[in-house]
Image: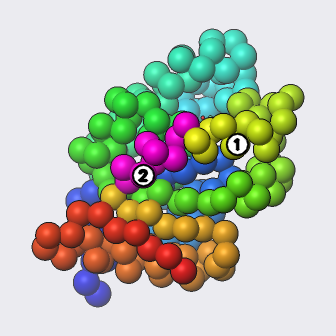
C-alpha cells in the first residue's frame, strides 16, 4: 500500500476542546498503522497530577511549558498520530515544532457541536465553573485564525468518524502532490 502521507512526519490533530481529536486520532492511527498518543495524557504522566491540578497549583503558563516539552519529545521520537490539547497549537513555540516535525490537521467544528461534546467529559479547567458556550465562543474567535495555519483543515460534526478518517487520508495523500501545501476538506 502506498503511504497516504510523508511517513517521516507525525500527523498532529489540532482544534478546540470537543472537536473530536482523540476519537478521530485513535481511528486514524489504526487505519494507517501508526502509534497513537494523546498529548494531554502524556502531560499528566510527566507532571504526576491531573490537568485541573496543574492549572490550579502551578497556573496555565506552567501547563504550556510542560505541554511544549512533552510534544517536542513525542515529535522527535518518531512518526505517530498525535491528538493535542486545544491550546497546544496556539503556543508559538509548540506551533513551530509541529511545523518542523509534523503535518497539522485542524478539526474545525461549529459552536453547537463543541458545546454538546464538551458536556460529555469534565476535567477541562478552562470550562470549569464558567458559561461554556460563551467561553468556547470566545476561544473560537481567538484561536480559529491561528488554527487556520494548519496544513489541512477538516470540517467535523456532520459525518461519522470513519468517513472522516477516509477524508483525512485523502487530504494527506493530496498534500504529497507536488506544489500542494495546504488543503481544505469538506464533507
Ligand atoms: C485546553 C484543552 C484541553 C487541555 C487543557 C487546555 C485548551 O485539551 O489541554 O484543559 O487550552 O484548549 P482538549 O482539547 O483535549 O480538551
> Which x, y percent locates residue 155?
55, 68
Q: Which residues are magenta?
A: 142-150
Query: Percent from the top left, x then y, of residue 154?
Result: 49, 67
Q: Nearer the viewer, residue 55 or 79?
A: 55
Cβ atoms under marks 1 and 2 closer than 8 Å: no
Residue farthest to the bottom, as pictured: 1
* Left or right of residue 42, residue 118 in this image: right
Depth check, front residue: 179 or 170? 179
User: Disc 1 marks which residue?
Assistant: 136
The quarter in which the N terminus is drawn is bottom left
Magenta span includes 2: no
The residue tagged with tag 2: helix, strand or loop?
loop
Colouring chosen for the image of the structure: rainbow
Q: Name the residue at 49% across, 51% down.
A: 14
- Locate residue 128 relative to residue 173 in the image: left or right: right
Residue 90 in view, yes or no: yes
Image position of 163 with respect to 107: above or below: below
- Residue 49: % across, % down: 67, 25
Residue 148, numbered circle: 2
Q: Residues within 10 Å of mark 1 (few under 14, many from 20)?
A: many
Amino acid at each position: 500500500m502506498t503511504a497516504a502521507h510523508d511517513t517521516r512526519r507525525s500527523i498532529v490533530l489540532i482544534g478546540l476542546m470537543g472537536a473530536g481529536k482523540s476519537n478521530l486520532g485513535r481511528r486514524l492511527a489504526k487505519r494507517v498503522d501508526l502509534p497513537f498518543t494523546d498529548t494531554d495524557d502524556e502531560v499528566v504522566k510527566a507532571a504526576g497530577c491531573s490537568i485541573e491540578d496543574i492549572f490550579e497549583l502551578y497556573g496555565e503558563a506552567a501547563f504550556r511549558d510542560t505541554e511544549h516539552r512533552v510534544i517536542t519529545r513525542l515529535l522527535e521520537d518518531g512518526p505517530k498520530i498525535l491528538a493535542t490539547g486545544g491550546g497546544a497549537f496556539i503556543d508559538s513555540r509548540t506551533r513551530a515544532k509541529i511545523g518542523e516535525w509534523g503535518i497539522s490537521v485542524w478539526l474545525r467544528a461549529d459552536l453547537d457541536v463543541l458545546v454538546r461534546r464538551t458536556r460529555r467529559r469534565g476535567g477541562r479547567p478552562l470550562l470549569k465553573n464558567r458559561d461554556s458556550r460563551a467561553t468556547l465562543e470566545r476561544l473560537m474567535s481567538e484561536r480559529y485564525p491561528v488554527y487556520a495555519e494548519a496544513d489541512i483543515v477538516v470540517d467535523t460534526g456532520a459525518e461519522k468518524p470513519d468517513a472522516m478518517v477516509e477524508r483525512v487520508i485523502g487530504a494527506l495523500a493530496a498534500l504529497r502532490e507536488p506544489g500542494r501545501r495546504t488543503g481544505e476538506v469538506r464533507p
